[in-house]
Amino acid sequence: MASALGGVAERIAFTASGTEAIHLAVRGTMSANRTRPTRILSAAVEHSAVLAAADAAARAGAEHVRVPVDHEGRVDVDALRTELSAGAALVNVQHANHEIGTLQPVVDVAGLCREYDALLHVDACQSVGRLPVDLTELGADLLSLSAAKFGGGRGTGALLWSPRARLVAQLAGDEREQRLRAGLQHLPGIAAMAEALLQWSPLDPDGAAAQEATRSHGVRRALRRALSERIDDVVVHGPAEDTAPHIVALSALYCDGETMVSELDRAGFAVHSGSSCATTSGEPSHVLVAMNAMTHGHVRVSLGPEVQREHIDTFVDALSKVVAALRG
């Protein structure tokens, strides 16, 4: 696992999920912090697990600042620099956004963090196994991931860290995982996660992940074009390029996202409204709100290996009928 992600075996801990890895990264870092300012900076579009972990640290005495993003969901680097100049212990900037796919300028952010002596946590749950993710090349101090996102099975995640990072266990009780994570390890899940990652070979430019990314980008581009051309008052979110190859997010005016999901399910298409981990509170997507984007009828389409180019026309036909019926 470490060699496939640019880390070392002595600085990787296995967890029960990506969420647990994120909490260990954020709360574990703040619990270990003795010298840096007790401030956490998070891009406003971070996954809810990251924001919740930072908010939990804030309840324990830290300050949590959400840094604004542009209309495509990229963190405002100038705003981040301003906040860093006031001091921070930890910065949270994800690799790829979980709702719209936008890739963040992680390497640039890492340079800023070094300049202002802050640690950088990168939530790479959406990109590990699909894109090249290298702890050292990104300049990250902490890297969290989930096996569920690249075919490694549910119930397993991991956290890698650099020599700069210091962590305090959030689940105490025994000496496993370098005293950072109590409880019996899910060994079959860990083995499956490692094998899946090795099969994808994401650091190999000619590997399975690179080939799938090229194919998936073609499907993604075709879907974005078809949505824009064939359905009125639909906004396709995020950048056309420099994005994760497997995510397309859209909003349809005068439609309800959850109803669209249900109707598309009846038509044979499994999609989601917003984040796969979002609650059913009825609140609009915090990602789209941060981008100042349209939140009506928000639907996220994930393009797995089984989704082919020929499926695009049938999907857009079905979506067009659903949208027309709901607007009617």
Image (cartoon, grey):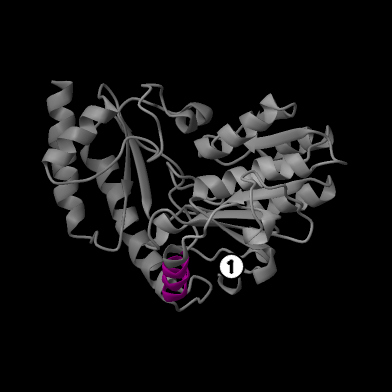
User: Against 219, is 290 above or below?
Assistant: above
Within the magenta stretch, is there residue 196? yes
Q: What is the x, y in percent for residue 100?
A: 43, 43
Taking depth in this image into account, of 174 and 127 the one nearest to the observer is 174
Which residue is found at the position 51% from the left and 45% from the top? 19
> Is residue 271 shown left or right of residue 21?
left
Q: Which residue is mark 1?
A: 5
> Is residue 96 shown left or right of residue 32?
left
Taking depth in this image into account, of 153 and 185 the one nearest to the observer is 185
User: Against 145, is 34 above or below?
Assistant: above
Taking depth in this image into account, of 262 and 216 the one nearest to the observer is 262
Range covered by the magenta-colored residues: 190-199
Q: What is the x, y in percent for residue 174?
A: 64, 54
Which residue is found at the position 70% from the left and 49% from the top? 120
Which residue is found at the position 48% from the left and 33% from the top? 287
Quarter of the rendering occupied by the C terminus: top left
Instruction: Decide if residue 240 is in sight here.
Output: yes
Quarter of the rendering occupied by the N terminus: bottom right
Instruction: Decide if residue 67 is in sight here.
Output: no
Which residue is found at the position 18% from the left and 30% from the top? 323
